[in-house]
Amino acid sequence: MVGDPDDVVEARRRGASGHRALPHTADVRIEAWGASRERCLAEAVVGMVECFADVADVRPSSVERLRPTGPGDAELLAGLLDEVIYRMEVYGQVTVDVAAGHVGGPGGGLEVRLAVAGVSDVEITGAVPKAVSWHELRMGPDPYGWSCAVTIDA
């Protein structure tokens, strides 16, 4: 991404995945990257969760499987992050790990596995996200793989 610090660019050249959070008025902006679309999506989820919870030592209590869809990659990203927020608000589930992969064959697409724990098992460290903003939402291929950026309303 343009303007990235040299260490981020060098890591991306080596194929590393990652994410970072940037302050954005009363919200937070998440930037994520990966060698594949699936890895980039997973990094965005991890980046968002890290903004409000410490899940480093938390063991998941269950794994939820999703098949998110959308007309484009940015919509897919927004839908996935909205689902993570929804599970927190409605079911009290905090995502502690995530994996995404391509499912081939007829009706294939994206499958996401969210390892979740109950909110009572997680240390909440910040404001829980309320929504995903569509303003300046982006996701797509770049010179090193895939990258995305999204603003989260806290």
Image (cartoon, rainbow, N blue to C red):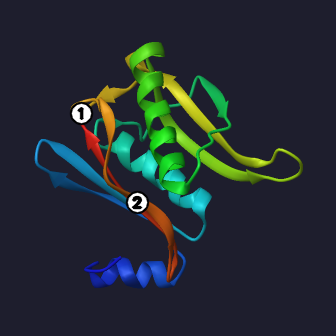
| Left or right placement of residue 23 versus residue 90 in this view | left
Label 2 environment density (alpha carbons within 10 Å; few <14, some 14–19, many ≥20): some
| Left or right placement of residue 82 versus residue 116 in this view | left
Q: Position of residue 65 (x, y in %)?
A: 68, 32
Per the image, label 2 sits on a secondary structure element best described as strand
Is there CB contact under 8 Å for labels 1 and 2? no
Q: Quadrant of the C terminus?
A: top left
Q: Position of residue 77 (x, y in %)?
A: 49, 48
User: In this view, which residue lies farthest toward the right?
Assistant: 105
- 4, 54: nearer the viewer: 4
Q: Amino acid at mark 1?
A: Thr
Q: Quadrant of the N terminus?
A: bottom left
Q: Position of residue 47 (x, y in %)?
A: 38, 50
In the image, which is nearer the foreground, mark 1 or mark 2? 2
Please give the residue where the numbered disc 2 appears in the rendered image.
138
Q: Amino acid at mark 2?
A: Arg
User: In this view, which residue lies farthest toward the left?
Assistant: 25
Question: In 3D space, how far apart are the residues under numbered discs 1 and 2 (Cα atoms)?
Answer: 27 Å
Please give the residue where the numbered disc 1 appears in the rendered image.
125
Residue at 45% over, 67% down? 147
In the image, residue 32 sits, relative to residue 83, either above or below, namely below
Q: Is residue 89 visible?
A: yes
In the image, residue 89 sits, relative to residue 74, either above or below, namely above
| Left or right placement of residue 127 versus residue 148 in this view | left
Residue at 38% over, 82% down? 9
In the image, residue 115 sits, relative to residue 150, either above or below, namely above
In the image, residue 18 sits, relative to residue 15, either above or below, namely above
Q: Is residue 33 visible?
A: no
Residue at 32% over, 33% down? 131
Residue at 24% over, 33% down? 125
N-terminal-most mark, 1 or 2? 1
- 113, 120: nearer the viewer: 113
